[in-house]
Amino acid sequence: MAQKTYAGVTVELTDEGYLVDKTQWNKEMAVDIAQENDITLTAKHFAVIEFLRDKVAKGETLTIRAIGKSGIVDIKGFYELFPGAPLKLATKISGLSKPVSCV
Amino acid sequence: MKKIIIVGAGTAGTLMANKLRKALSVKDWSITIIDKYKIHYYQPGFLFIPFGTYSEKDVIKQKSQFIPSGVELLYADVDRIDGQNNQVILVDGKILDYDYLVIATGTQTRPDETPGLLGDNWYKNIFDFYTIEGALALHKFFESWQGGTLVVSITEIPFKCPVAPLEFVFLADAYFTKRGIRDKVKIIYTTPMSGAFTKPKATAFLGNLLKEKNIELVPDFYIEEVDSENKTVRSYDGREVAYDCLTVIPMNMGDEVIARSGLGDDMNYVATDKNTLRSIAFENIFVLGDATNIPASKAGSVAHFAGETLIGNMLDAINGRPLSHSFDGHANCYIETGFGKASLIDFNYETEPLSGTYPIPVIGPFSLLGNTRINHLGKLAFKTIYWEFLLKDRKLPVSDKMSMAGKEKN
């Protein structure tokens, strides 16, 4: 567990950097978390963030493939917005839990 | 006469046919199981074919051998399932009514879903080992191969038998070592996952084995396409891995019949309650095996353990009772590690693979997350257990629900 301050609010983070108390999340916080990961958020980023939060609120699982079919970005576009490990990065910035992969 | 139809006569369908026939009176219940194909493959055996340990005859039997008398085995192509009208419609137009339906249509490899896989080099230097054709073609290739870069790639999760790609590289390491050309073979393992496996303890154990065996792990590698002319596999983030031989675990999707029936998600898996195994869409449709979308591994052991829950719940449903049985997501898998040894993992929805002994505390005889010869013997013996016990629903001395007995909690 670690503590960080984003957008003036001190939050607890899991070992992997995800918000422990997800109710603390807001858009300003997202900007700071993104900045920490060398990303400047654009409207497109926020469209994806909204899509992810919406899906999770509905109880659906997040997969890169589903995001690619969202109509907001394709898979390549998703990788361009959140380089490296896009699903892990996007969920972190969106104030969501680390995606569960069940194999 | 009431009717039960089972669509699919693979592992799950066959074991349910046996369970249902035993549980229901022949006088009151007719049971029909439908499949397109006559051959039942022992799919865990495909892993051994590229390395010459098993041949084709070791993994083939007739489906009819495992269907009990009193169950009609119908070889037919299903066009779709009409859940609203409780009907199965065959491609030839015939309509079959049911009171209850079990969907057991499994999952299949879809190399057509990844650009560059199929084409001139498919089964020339690009292979899968998840089909009998692929496994046999790869065996032919390996027999005369003098070395180069072997890339083993997972396209997408989920896929059936999650440990098989790891087993494959472990066995490849042993195979080329025995042939005396291991120093001429570079083995690279690419996966869209962030590590060798998903949960921490198993990931650490398996990741260490990869390192020990000098197998390069390329994680977070989500394949966009295969450039078969230049022999490279490319990820969505622009990374490229060059190969001389590419062994791919293609995208796995459920059967197209599920799509045609309007019952599937974007990968053709049926929305299923993860505990009751009833389909979300229809009260009289149940789903077992790889065809479900439950967050358990797609593996024969899961179908076996879940089958116990399913028969209980189907009998509840038939007798007008609320569904009282709950599947805990139990799975267990042997993991061949090469040189006559294997590991074993045993887990469920709540509990990741832990160290310990299985099935009996201390005595075992199998070692969880260990690497032993006895585990390997267990893996080999499993073929007999599969044909003689599992498919025919003869009782095995292991519990269906995962047990913490013998497991090290930390």
Image (cartoon, helix red, strand yellow):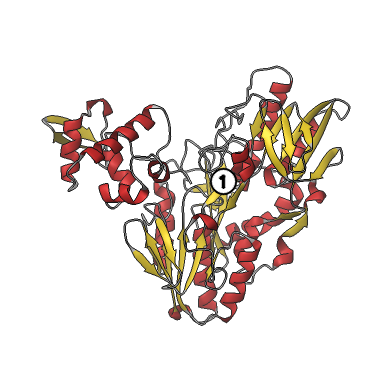
Give the side of residue A85 with respect to residue B164, left or right.
left
- State the residue position of label 1: B298
Which percent across, then down, holds residue B227?
Answer: 42, 67
- Judged from this view, the residue extending furthest toward the right is B27
The image shows residue B30 at horizontal and vertical percentages of 83, 31
Q: In which quarter of the image is residue B178?
A: bottom right
Q: In this view, does A67 lie to the left or right of B84?
A: left
- B343 vs B263, nearest the viewer: B263
Can residue B123 be seen in the rendering of this structure?
A: yes
Q: In which quarter of the image is the C terminus of chain B?
A: top left
For image coordinates 61% across by 65% down, the residue present is B134
| Location of residue B57 in the rendering, given as x and y in whole percent from the top left corner | 74, 65
Q: What residue type is labelled 1?
A: Lys
Left/right placement of residue A29 relative to residue B210 reads: left
Q: Nearer the viewer, residue B105 or B142?
A: B105
Q: Where is residue A15 in the image (x, y as percent from the top left)?
A: 27, 41
